[in-house]
Amino acid sequence: MSDNKRVVLITGGTKGIGKEMGLMFAKHGDQVVITYGWGSIEEEDVIKEYTDRGLPAPFLKQADVINNEDTTELLTEIKNRFGKLDVFISNVSFTTLVKNMDDYNEAYLLKSIEYSCWPMIEYTRQMKTVFGAYPKYVMALSSHGPDRFHKNYDFAAATKSLNEVLVKYLTYHFYDDGVIFNILRTRPVITDSLLSTLGNEWVEFIAKYDIPGTHIELEEVAKVAYMMTSGLMDGIRGQTIIADRGYDFMEGLQRMYIDQEELGL
């Protein structure tokens, strides 16, 4: 592998935003490494999706993000195959849906943190052990959850909020090592993960009460992720970058009042 070809690790990169980011990095010539959960995909299908688009095939590895042995094995294999790791995107998000107070369980909350927050830290630390150096870029995904109510989203929102706070402190602790930490926050994007949280009826609801063209697309999110790790935004560190088409400012009852005729209200 040539030295100028970057190696990019995306955990949980076979569906939704993670998949789109992988395709975007591959489109720009990067070697993409994707992890996935046991029994969640057929590797041949993922590889075919890349090759059918004329993109270099990703390297896929089954790995549980909270299993340290899996993490060590993954990173060691990346080192043996590619010799380095330039970009790490912590994309796995797993949480318990909170439908009522009966779901407020300490173990459920801690498990959400373990899966959706801790890998950003633990993977980065292990990379130094395996590669002898940290990746230049570390990024995690976030959402509206820390700022506004979403159905069933209590623990997911708490985890996203924790990521957004910790990324500032991680920037301080890793500053001398040259690691650039940031968070990418998006508006709701229609993915399997989102529908499992809000329910399939949510799509019909927004189709009725939202203005067409205001919801950000997967490819747009992937472009922002690529730009944040391209070298052109290295002056931005420890920040939560919001990809929302600027529409968050216009949401709410006031916007629905103004556009009530268009929305059929």
Image (spheres, rainbow, N blue to C red):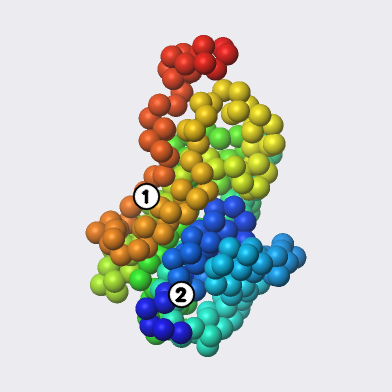
Q: Secondary structure at mark 2?
A: strand
Look at the picture and state if 82 lies above or below 231: below
Residue 139, given in percent of the width and then of the height, sits at: 42, 60
Q: Residues within 10 Å of mark 1 (few under 14, many from 20)?
A: many
Look at discs 1 and 2 and give the one toward the viewer: 2
Q: Residue at x 46, y 71 (%)?
A: 30
* Residue situated furthest bottom in the rendering: 80
Determine which of the numbered discs, if any, sits on residue 118 in the image: none
Determine which of the numbered discs, if any, sits on residue 240 in the image: 1
Front residue (pair 182, 105): 182
Q: Residue at x 41, y 59 (%)?
A: 226
Name the residue tied to disc 2.
7
Dot placed on the residue nearer the N-terminal end, 1 or 2 = 2
Quarter of the picture containing the C terminus is top right
Distance Cα–Cα, label 1 vs label 2: 23 Å
Q: Quadrant of residue 183?
A: bottom left
Front residue (pair 263, 86): 263
Residue 175, given in percent of the width and then of the height, sits at: 27, 68
Q: Residue at x 29, y 74 (%)?
A: 177
